Image (cartoon, rainbow, N blue to C red):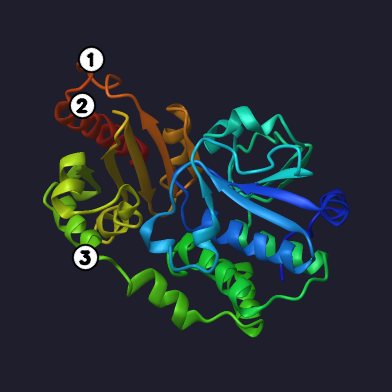
Amino acid sequence: MGGMKAPEDLLRKIRQGNRFLLTSHANPDGDAIGSELGLARLLRGLGKGAVVWNHDPTPTVYKPLPGSDRIHVGEEPPAGFPEKFDAIIVLECPSPDRTGLEKHLAERPVINIDHHLGNQCYGTVNWVDSAAPAVGEMVYRLAQGLKAALEPELASCLYLTLVTDTGGFRFSNATPAAFEAAAALVRDGAHPEQVSQWLYESQPLGVVRLLGEMLQTLQLHEGGRVATGRLTLAMFQKAGAAPGDSEGLIDHLRSIAGVEAVALIREREDGTQKVSLRSRGEVDVEKIARHHGGGGHRNAAGYSLDGTAAAGNTAGNTGSDGEAIRQQVAAELGAALS
């Protein structure tokens, strides 16, 4: 399998440690959740303690993953932190502030495992491989370096990271390494059919209704080369959907023929707007996200904006804020096409 081996200083830290705290970026996605749960199971299989702590709740689509019910969520630390932990392992997160828990990261040594462009190498140990198709694939390589056996549920968690981050092996990061890792994980007991059921055949009714709400906001720009959509708090309420139920909806915008870049603007309860970006081929949306303080990959990135950040709108007027941000983002995506 391709890719760099897990560095010796990382292997040494894990061998020497007894209990680890695992976290990832706020609003965790499939690679974040799958990597955390997979690594937690790996560490426990080695006789070590592992606690997953995320700032934001697990999106509904990932709640069937084994161990998701044990994730500690919120701003308050889990029991025993920091005294009873040897290190914090931050997965799939390019900068400390993206965790939402950055004020706690200084309390223990940080191990940084990531594949994002522009990772700030903020750990005492940094393993950054921008060629990796998913951080879950890096966790698999870590297991190889530790000579640890994988059991089926662990393998399924890591297999899910590959499916979600490659868009079902449809995106440009569906490299030979992605397919090789997927095949190896299936040999180790991963169940592709079960992962497919988790991702595509277990949607709550609220998710389907929320998709309908989003599609009603669809707009095309730049002669049909850019598509945008919106999600407001009122739409979530009408659909009976939770905040995490919007995971993956942006892919429906990207599925439109002729569309090369898309944006989904989601209103959040704190008044901010979350802007998710996706693109095809050489259209680089990571640069746009980085300009606004966010980040990601060339074809998948995101950032947050305060409600007042677009067109001088008044705070609290989230409807006009979202529309102004939509037009701003559409213009930036249009510029990225040229």
Residue 232 spot, x, y in % from top left? 20, 40
Give the mark, 3 or 1, whose residue is nearer the N terminus.
Answer: 3
Mark 2 surroundings within 10 Å by alpha-carbon count, few (fewer than 14), some (14 through 19), many (20 or more): many
The residue tagged 2 is 321
Tag 2, which secondary structure? helix
Q: Earlier in the sequence, mark 2 or mark 3?
A: 3
2 or 1: tag closer to the N-terminus = 1
Tag on residue 205? 3
Nearest the eye: 198 or 220: 198
Instruction: Determine the CA span between mark 3 and mark 1.
Output: 37 Å
Q: Residues within 10 Å of mark 3 (few under 14, many from 20)?
A: few
Q: Amino acid at mark 1?
A: Gly
Which corner quadrant holds the N terminus?
bottom right
Task: Please tell me whether mark 3 or mark 1 is closer to you in this view.
Answer: 3
Q: What residue appears at the point 62 percent right and 64 percent down from the top-left corner?
A: 38
The residue shown at (49%, 40%) is 74
Tell whether 332 sits left or right of 235.
right
Query: Does the image show residue 232?
Result: no
Give residue 148's quadrant in the image.
Answer: bottom right
Vertical relation: 247 (above or below) 204: above
- Residue 312: numbered disc: 1
Mark nearest the camera among 2 and 3 is: 3
Q: Picture coordinates of residue 59 (x, y %)?
A: 39, 55
SS class of the residue under badge 1? Answer: loop
